[in-house]
Image (cartoon, helix red, strand yellow):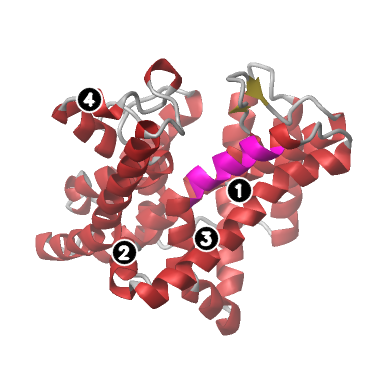
Amino acid sequence: MLIHAYDPVKGYDGTLVSLQGRDPAADVVMFFVSQIFARLSVPAFFVFAGFFFFRSTFASGLNRWVTEVAKRIRTLLIPFLIWSLLVLLVYYAAQRIGVVPVGEDSRVGNIAQLSLVEIIDLLLGVTRYPVAYQFWFLRDLIVCVAISLPVIFASRGAFITVTAVLGLCWFSGYGVTLIPSSTALFFFLLGGLSSVVRCNLELPVPAPFLIVGLVILAICDFLAKDSEAGEYIHRAFLLCGVASLSLVGKLISRNETIAGSIKALGATAFFLYAAHEPGLMALKKFLVNLYPWEGTIQVLFAFFLPALLVIVLCGAAYKFLASVVPKFLSVSTGGRN
């Protein structure tokens, strides 16, 4: 959400409005939060997904792979289809009553005039982002799982070689694939490789040095954001960041209370992930146009408030739906409890 909170939105007059450029100190904080640290969400998501998938399937035979893929149909594919269809219907209804634009000003086009093939493309995100934009995560993960069969029969050496080649391509900025993205595929395989060789992606350095190194890389990432070297520094930060997240995960797992609480929030977190975008965009547009936010405190308040409100509202909505339609909610969140 904090990544999306940084982006400009269209004002009520159709022009782009943004919190960026209103206060230098606020600009620094917003960039660090949304464009550096929050960007760890993509590699972390695919690393952990790959870790758990290949831990169960690598060198375990076809039957085991089929079993794990079947589980992902319930936890990934079915929720993806349900939420994509719901978002499509919401967009269609909103366009019919004139709440959201159609045509060139719309990310989804005029739904009423789309052909069946175009609607399927919009739902699944075959040649574009899915209608539920944030679900490109799930789309890419579903494809990664679907094409993983050759990997489970590969040798460790072949697994390491393929992952290393993809990693070099990713780091150099050379896109090998479109769907899944090179980032998604590399980190999915990297997570899987870490489970196979049992390294857990932990760098052989003490935690304090890792944290200091991560902070230094983050500062360099910010300072070099407009330079040619900036992309390489950012990718180096992401690699070290994934290693630090692995360390955090290890520390959390040692505390059963914290680990249990995080696990218990799984379904709520998925619901928040699935439902947050429309509300976040609407609140951003409303707040940015409500008041001429100026000064560090005001700008940061307007930056963080929409995300906090969406968390509260989605949490309340989840509890309400859990009491009204618990079975549907369970299916739409992948059976997470």
Q: Secondary structure at mark 2?
A: loop
Asked where in the image residue 332 lies, by quadrant, the reply is bottom left
Q: Closer to the N terminus: mark 3 or mark 2?
A: 3
Height in image: 28 above or below 66? above
Marks 2 & 1, CB-CB < 8 Å contact: no
Q: CA distance from mark 4 to mark 2?
A: 29 Å
Task: Tell me the residue at 70%/39% (across/down).
Answer: 287
Q: Which residue is mark 2?
A: 334
Magenta-drawn segment:
276-287
Q: Of all residues shown, which one is farthest toward the front?
A: 97
> Residue 245 location, x and y as percent?
58, 57
Of residues 277 and 126, the one drawn nearer to the viewer in this rendering = 277
Q: CA distance from mark 4 to mark 3?
A: 31 Å
- Front residue of 148/11: it is 11
* In this view, 112 is above or below 136: above
- Residue 335, given in percent of the width and then of the height, sits at 31, 69
Q: Is residue 16 visible?
A: yes
* Structural distance between the alpha carbons of marks 3 and 1: 28 Å
Residue highlighted by disc 1? 241
Separation of marks 2 and 1 at Cα, in angstroms: 28 Å
Mark 4–mark 1 CB contact (< 8 Å)? no
Q: Which mark is residue 223?
A: none
Please name the residue that numbered disc 4 is placed on: 114
Q: Report the amino acid beneath label 2.
A: Gly
Q: Amino acid at mark 4?
A: Leu
**Mark 4 or 2 closer to N-term?**
4
Q: Residue furthest right?
A: 295
Q: Which mark is residue 314?
A: 3
Q: Residues within 10 Å of mark 1 (few under 14, many from 20)?
A: many
Q: Residue at x 71, y 50 (%)?
A: 305
The residue tagged with tag 3: helix, strand or loop? helix
Bin the neighbour count of mark 2 within 10 Å (Cα to Cα): few under 14, some 14-19, many 20 and up: many
